[in-house]
Structures are given as structure tokens and as C-alpha cells.
Amino acid sequence: MNFSNKTDKEIAELLDQYMIKHGPVVGSTRKLYEKKLHEALESNEGKKSSPLKTIYQEEEEEIILTRSALRPSPKSELYTDWEARTTEMDHHSAYNRKQYSTEPTGHSFKYQEVLRDYKDESQPIRSSSATFRNVSHSKPSHVTAPVKPTTIKDSQDKRYIPIWLQFMVFILFAGFLYYVFTNMEVTPKNPFEHIN
Amino acid sequence: MSSTSQKHRDFVAEPMGDKPVTALSGIGEVLGKKLEEQGFDKAYVVLGQFLILRKDDDLFIDWLKDACGANSKQALLCYSCLKEWCDAFL
């Protein structure tokens, strides 16, 4: 999208739309704001989708999530479930495969995987969050739910070390400290006690 | 003892007047030259840009990196320098 045709005022309005904080749009700041708008547009492209697609995939997500919620399936089983159900999204299956090979299938992380995959397959934030809501509770909560999946996904994308590993290292370290603490002996007040 | 450089302290100690852009902390010969090419030949012009970006750190640092190719450290030094100057004199 070319921003050079827009007036300064239009640029300012667009910046407000994308919730980018900014000052007045003048000659020296124009280039910077156009660049910011380009970045905002590119990051939004992955989130756009048509409404019809949303409805269909919302149902599919629900089914998969409820199935995975019922039993802790091993990696291969989950993958075959995906394969059977995502025939429509074959062009993304290669990407999905790569995702699964690097991530564990701990129960709590399945939601994240589903959300991430659907997110990358041009799903709007709202549909994934609706599914998230459907599985966990029946009441629609519109403000808090959309925020959570995106933040999980955003922080997931930027991590170089997977979060499960970080948690494990943390718990191991905490356990180690606890072990050391409990095994500390109380030193006798009088060092010469035993001799006497 | 603060962790600021002598250049920073010198700049922040008095009104900038007509000081060249290289007087700013983080801006050396190379970056100064690039800024001058764009019309930012004096420190007060960069101050103007800083103010019009509402003294915001993200915006100013982004702008500076884009304008003269400063790295994060240099841009941050320049930002802190200007910010402190503004706190004292603006």
C-alpha cells in the first residue's frame, strides 16, 4: 500500500487506527510514520480472513480441541487427527509438521498449537479466541479472551528457547535449591561438644 | 558517580546554543555527517525533531536509526542526552 498519496492528516488518522503513538505528521516525520504503517500492515496481513471461512474453521477447531481435551494423545495420533481434518489446508500442512516436530504435546500446550496454526493460516484473532472460549467455558467474554491468545502467540514467536524448556529449567533449579536447603545441617553452637 | 560519558555531561550542563550535531552524545563524525546531509546540521535541529516526536523514546530512536544508521546504543545515548537536556532547560 502506497502512502505517498495520502495527506498528512490521513496518515495521522491511519496511525490512530493502528494504535501507533505519534506526533504531528510533518515533513521530517512523514517518512518514519509511513514506515511504521508499512510494518503495521505487514504484521496485520497474517491476521486477516473472510467471515465465511471463520465460521467453518471455528467448528473444526472446536471438534479438534474437544477431542484433544478428552485424552492425552501421543504426537503421532494428534498429527493424524490433524491430517484427516485439515484436508482443506493442505498447503499449510508442511508448516504444521514442522511445528509439531519442535513442540511437545503436553496437554496445556495443545491450545497454543491450535491457536498458532490457525493464526498462521490466515485466521482472525476472534475465531481462535471464540474457540478457546467454547472449550473452556460457555459464556462469551469478549474483551479479555482476544488479548490472551495473541499475546501467547506473539511471545511464542519471539522465543528462541521454548517455554516448556524454560519452565523445566526453572523447576529443576528451584528443586535443586530446595534440596540443598533441606539438607543443610544445623551447626552445633559449641564446636567442642563432641570432644567433651 | 553516574554512568554517563563526559560528552553527555558536557552537553547537558548548559544551553546548547549553536553547538554542532556532533556535540550530541552518541553522535560522532560519521553519524554527524549523515545527519548534516539531511539538513540536521545543528544540535537544535535534532532537538526540534526530538520535540516533534513528542520526546518519545521509541519514535526518536527509530527515527535516528533510520535517518543516519545509528545503532541502538548510539541512538539511546542521543535520546538520553536530549531528554536530560530538556528536563533541565526546556
Image (spheres, coloured by chain):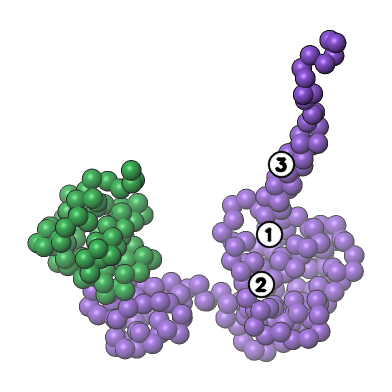
Chain colours: A purple, B green
Mark 2 or 3 closer to N-term? 2
Counting from the top left corner in percent of width and height, residue A77 is at 85, 61
Q: Residue A20 appears in which quarter of the rendering? A: bottom left
Q: Mark 2 or mark 1: which is in front?
A: 2
Q: Mark 2 or mark 3: which is in front?
A: 3
Residue in view at x 35 percent, y 51 percent: B73
A99 vs A153, nearest the viewer: A153
Residue in view at x 11 percent, y 62 percent: B17
Q: Which residue is mark 3?
A: A173
Mark 2 or 1 closer to N-term? 1
Give the number of the disc on residue A61: none
Q: Chain of mark 3?
A: A
Contact (Cβ within 8 Å) of mark 2 with mark 3: no
Give the number of the disc on residue A149: 2
Tell me if residue A145 comes above or below residue B20 in the rendering: below
Q: CA distance from mark 2 to mark 3?
A: 29 Å
A186 vs A162, nearest the viewer: A186
Q: Which residue is mark 1?
A: A99
Q: Chain of mark 2?
A: A
Residue type of the residue flagged with mark 3: Phe
Counting from the top left corner in percent of width and height, residue A61 is at 77, 77
Task: Please tell me whether mark 1 sits on a helix, a strand or a loop.
Answer: helix
A45 vs B67, nearest the viewer: B67
